[in-house]
Image: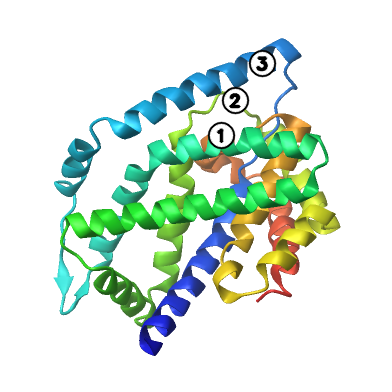
């Protein structure tokens, strides 16, 4: 039992670091759009409800077929007793793909609930909804990963031990980047409806730096709550990401999936002002997370 707990604690540290990278990466790629009129916003909410209903139907239809198709696209290879980096990468990617339909349903529903709570200044309910959301997403990803490994006849222990072996062999940075990229990839489950400019992106990043630096009450309370145990600490960067995303939506009417499109344009990051803003953002983030680590 002791060795298993130690193994899971180490794995949790990896997830915590990946979560931090996910947060910083996600914040880099935010943008601003003009605020919609009330009627336009109502139409967006209606479209999201229809989309959520369609995705919920898709979750229950043809999952076994999708799972079998995913299995056929993974090449399971071992190096000694452990899975290769390539196999781990493929398993993680396909697990994220399998999680996408449910991720979209969870995200759209929780957004509606927590933003309603935030608009009514119900801080306690809002905090709980943020926590519930990130726990649901993490549990979903873990469940899909476990299901997919099981379908490939790979035990959870073998998968985790293979990941730890890579870490101990000095491939932490490579695995970190893969995980951070995949956590952005899952956002594609919800189509973007916005087109953002570089100037809008700069304005949003400046606002995010302002939010992180000011450490508002809901952000501080969430960090304090999740800092209580090692098990919940790994949710901190993800919960912070959710709260900051809500601030950005409140001010600029953007969603996380809208940020994704900017990630695909490396030209955005050749701009010196952008480079400076990203450096400031990273510094602010590490200062916020510093007392936790």
Q: Residue furthest bottom?
A: 2
- In terms of sequence position, does the residue under pointer 1 or pointer 3 come before the other? 3
Asked which secondary structure carries label 1, the reply is helix
User: Residue at label 2?
Assistant: 195
**Real-space Cα separation, disc 1 to disc 3, in angstroms:** 15 Å
2 and 1 marks in contact (CB < 8 Å): no
* Mark 1 surroundings: few (<14), some (14-19) or many (≥20) residues within 10 A: some
- In terms of sequence position, does the residue under pointer 3 or pointer 2 come before the other? 3
For the point 16% across and 43% down, which residue is it? 68
Asked which secondary structure carries label 2, the reply is loop
From the top left corner, tell me how far across and down residue 237 is, in percent.
Answer: 62, 60
- In terms of sequence position, does the residue under pointer 2 or pointer 1 come before the other? 1
For the point 82% across and 50% down, which residue is it? 210
For the point 67% across and 55% down, which residue is it? 240
User: Residue at label 1?
Assistant: 109
From the top left corner, tell me how far across and down residue 247 is, in percent.
Answer: 75, 41
From the top left corner, tell me how far across and down residue 67 is, in percent.
Answer: 21, 43
Place residue 88 in its image quadrant. Answer: bottom left
**Real-space Cα separation, disc 2 to disc 1, in angstroms:** 24 Å
User: Residue at label 3?
Assistant: 42
Left or right: 287 as drawn, with respect to 161: right
**Real-space Cα separation, disc 3 to disc 2, in angstroms:** 19 Å
Q: Point out the frontmost of discs 1 and 3.
A: 1
From the top left corner, tell me how far across and down residue 145 is, in percent.
Answer: 32, 56
For the point 61% across and 43% down, which residue is it? 29
3 and 2 marks in contact (CB < 8 Å): no
Asked which secondary structure carries label 3, the reply is helix
Q: Can the viewer see residue 216 in this picture?
A: no
């Amino acid at each position: 039992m002791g060795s298993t707990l130690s193994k899971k604690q180490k794995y949790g540290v990896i997830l915590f670091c990946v979560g931090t990278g996910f947060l910083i990466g996600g914040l880099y790629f935010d943008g601003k759009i003009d605020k919609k009129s009330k009627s336009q916003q109502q139409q967006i909410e209606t479209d999201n409800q229809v989309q959520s209903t369609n995705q919920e139907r898709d979750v229950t239809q043809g999952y076994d077929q999708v799972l079998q198709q995913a299995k056929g696209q993974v090449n399971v290879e071992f190096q000694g007793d452990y899975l290769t980096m390539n196999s781990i990468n493929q398993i993680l990617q396909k697990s994220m793909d399998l999680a996408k339909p449910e991720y979209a349903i969870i995200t759209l529903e929780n957004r509606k609930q927590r933003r309603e709570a935030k608009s009514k200044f119900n801080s306690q309910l809002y905090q709980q909804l943020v926590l519930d959301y990130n726990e649901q997403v993490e549990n979903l990803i873990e469940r899909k990963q476990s299901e997919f490994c099981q379908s490939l006849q790979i035990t959870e222990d073998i998968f985790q031990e293979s990941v730890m072996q890579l870490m101990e062999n000095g491939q932490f940075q490579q695995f970190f980047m893969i995980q951070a990229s995949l956590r952005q990839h899952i956002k594609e489950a919800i189509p973007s409806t916005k087109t953002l400019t570089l100037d809008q992106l700069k304005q949003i990043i400046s606002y995010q730096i302002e939010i992180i630096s000011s450490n508002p009450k809901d952000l501080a309370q969430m960090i304090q709550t999740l800092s209580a145990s090692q098990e919940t600490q790994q949710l901190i960067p993800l919960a912070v990401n959710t709260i900051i995303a809500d601030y950005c939506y409140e001010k600029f009417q953007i969603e996380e999936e809208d940020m994704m499109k900017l990630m695909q344009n490396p030209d955005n990051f050749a701009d010196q002002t952008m480079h400076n803003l990203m450096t400031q953002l990273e510094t602010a983030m590490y200062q916020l997370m510093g007392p936790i680590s």
